[in-house]
Amino acid sequence: MSIFRKAERRKAKLRLAITGPAGSGKSYGALLVAFGIGGKIALLDTENGSGDLYSSLGAYDVCSINAPFTVQKYIDAIKDAENSGYDVLILDSISAEWAGTGGLLNLHTQITSANRANSYAAWGQITPKHNAFIDAIISSNLHIIATIRSKTEYAQVQNERGKTEIKKMGLGLVQRDGIDYEFTTVFDLSMEHTVTVSKDRTSLFDGQVFTLSEDTGRALKEWLDTGIDAPIVNNTPAAPADKRRVYEAYVRLFSDTPNDAPRLAQEAIMSVTNGRGSKDWTVDDIKSLEADLTRRSNKAVAEELPKAV
């Protein structure tokens, strides 16, 4: 039986990034889109209480987090929003996870300084944490809108009257390179609050320049709801006995090198769970690990078979 199946359009959850320099209207626009999608809305505020400023727009709940902006704070907020029955979660913003006080760039510097490690080796501790953050977003059963600050640059430009003026512009994202790959759609906001689209798997906004509104959210929701129901993701925490059984199976897999077996087992496990530790494993993680064990075991058996003459 083939591992492939027929491609089919499935319903999906929104993964939207809204980028722009300070003052471009990211939070405001994210809320408008969320209201268009509808349902119960939560906003995670990393911007010193600014999440409450737009309460006149409509009903939504706020949770503020302060420095240090650790990955675990973001993951805990996403899980809490899931367990509390929200439909849409706005992460405002995810720049702090990377470049904020206590974010991963800070942590990288601390590891390098404290252990006198080289920069490359320190990334070995940072990358699994960032992967866990990304995985929490991707695997969530919520519609997620993430705002991302863009670096600011000032340039001399000619206005419509032909006169030179200084203009504030966005330049690059305050996040790890490639973060835009993780989102279905990326809206880039200008200081004039207009949107251009740098990525759009929905094809709804190709070539358009527009302003964010509830209609934007309604259009996205219609696209997301088109197709058959997606498979149910089982995020139930894995049982301790299953965690232990799977870990011991990985150790046995590398029993030819007993001294290195625990380390090799851990590396293999991390590659399957995107860096999540065993305390965060779900029932689906156990299934993925079991499938990986089967694949590795079958390969090992195949390599031991006599070669055909």
Image: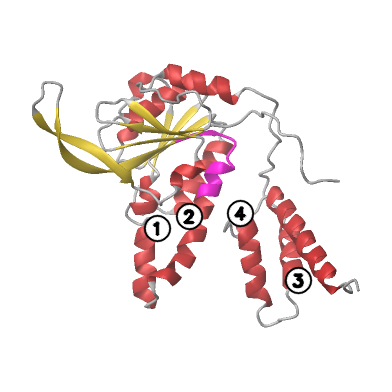
Q: Which mark is residue 253?
A: 3
Rounded to the nearest angstrom, the CA distance separating label 4 from label 3 is: 23 Å
Type of residue at label 2? His
Q: Tell me which numbered mark, 4 or 2, is placed earlier along the sequence.
A: 2
Give the SS element for disc 4.
helix
Give the quarter of the image for residue 194: top left
Q: CA distance from mark 1 to mark 2?
A: 8 Å
Image quadrant in which the C terminus is located: bottom right
The quarter of the picture where residue 278 lies is bottom right
Q: Who comes first in sequence, dot 1 or dot 3? A: 1
User: Badges 1 and 2: C-beta atoms under 8 Å apart?
Assistant: yes
Measured Cα–Cα span from mark 1 to mark 3: 33 Å
Q: Which mark is residue 104?
A: 1
Extreme residue toward the top, this view: 215
Find the residue positioned furthest to the left. Answer: 163
Q: CA distance from mark 2 to mark 3?
A: 28 Å
* 108 to the left or right of 222: left
Q: Residues within 10 Å of mark 1 (few under 14, many from 20)?
A: many
* Residue 29 image point, x, y percent: 36, 26
**Which residue bears the numbered disc 4?**
280
Can I make out residue 79 in this image? no
Q: Magenta part of the protein: which range?
A: 134-145
Amino acid type, residue under disc 3 in the picture: Leu
Lower position in the chain sequence, tag 2 or tag 3: 2
